[in-house]
Amino acid sequence: MRVVIAEDSAVVRAGLAEILADRGHEVVAAVGDGEALLAAVAEHHPDVTVVDVRMPPGYTDEGLRAAIAIRQDHPGTGILVFSQYIETRYAADLLSMRSGGVGYLLKDRVANVGEFIDAIARVASGGTALDPEVVAGMLNATRHASTLSALTARERDVLALMAEGRSNNAIAAGLSSFGTTHHQGLDLARQAAGELDVRIGGGPTVVRDFLAADLIDTLHVVQVPILLGRGARLWDGLEGAEERYDLEAVSSPSGVTHLTFTRR
């Protein structure tokens, strides 16, 4: 996995680069401001970027605005915002863009290095990784506040867990035996989104659930040439389901292949 890091603190920047390198990932650039981030992504075409929110020169929201520009110019590049701050205005804009993986984690709430690495891998593969506090902040600030205010606390919890890309079983475990189905979860997400599209992030188990229920119109799959030793096959039990979709495949210089399935 090829990574670009954008972090104004030299110490944090070096630490992130060392953590990623120790786990076999290639840090192709580590920069300290938004302009350098844009240049590094244009030059190296990474699989994912790790971006702080507040960077020079103004230390306000330069990182998020650079992330939005990357999403517009390089839609296949995953973006993981990693910061101490929740900036709801530009975060909502970033998360509303359709292509590529996206995440937003708070530095002081990441429990361990493994959790951080898992989040980067999820975002690089086209999934989502959102801190529940970020989700809560966005829900409170959303223009659909009247719709969201009608949701119960339990329904808000479901939306937060869906945003993290969790499977139905993981959502149920996180809610202490709340047995939601993918239909119920999708209905809640549609209520919250209003007229906007609903985006579902997750691994093959999550995607398989929604494919089996025939609830997906567009599916973006990222094929990464790594050997994990184990895993789940996307189409197991769904043989023939792919015939409902047109397929477009685009390969990147790093060997990653982006597959887009669009309902016929």
Image (cartoon, helix red, strand yellow):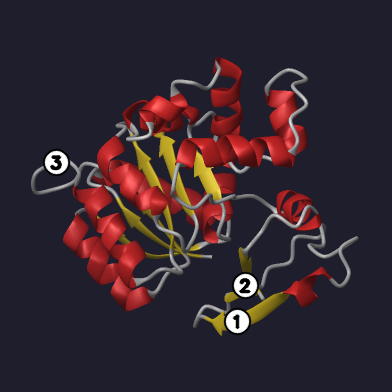
Three-letter amino acid code at the position of disc 3:
Tyr
Residue 14 horizontal/vertical position (percent): 35, 49
Three-letter amino acid code at the position of disc 1:
Glu
Which residue is denoted by mark 3 in the rendering? 59
Residue 150 horizontal/vertical position (percent): 49, 21
Work out whether mark 2 precedes mark 3 in sequence or the reverse, and give the earlier one: 3
Kind of element beneath mark 1? strand
Work out whether mark 3 precedes mark 1 in sequence or the reverse, and give the earlier one: 3
Residue 144 horizontal/vertical position (percent): 38, 34
Work out whether mark 1 precedes mark 2 in sequence or the reverse, and give the earlier one: 1
In the picture, residue 115 is in which quadrant?
top right
Label annotation for residue 262: 2
Q: Marks 2 and 1: in contact by CB < 8 Å?
A: yes
User: Quick one: quadrant of the N terminus?
Assistant: bottom right
Which residue is denoted by mark 1 in the rendering? 248
Kind of element beneath mark 3? loop
Residue 261 falls left or right of residue 61:
right
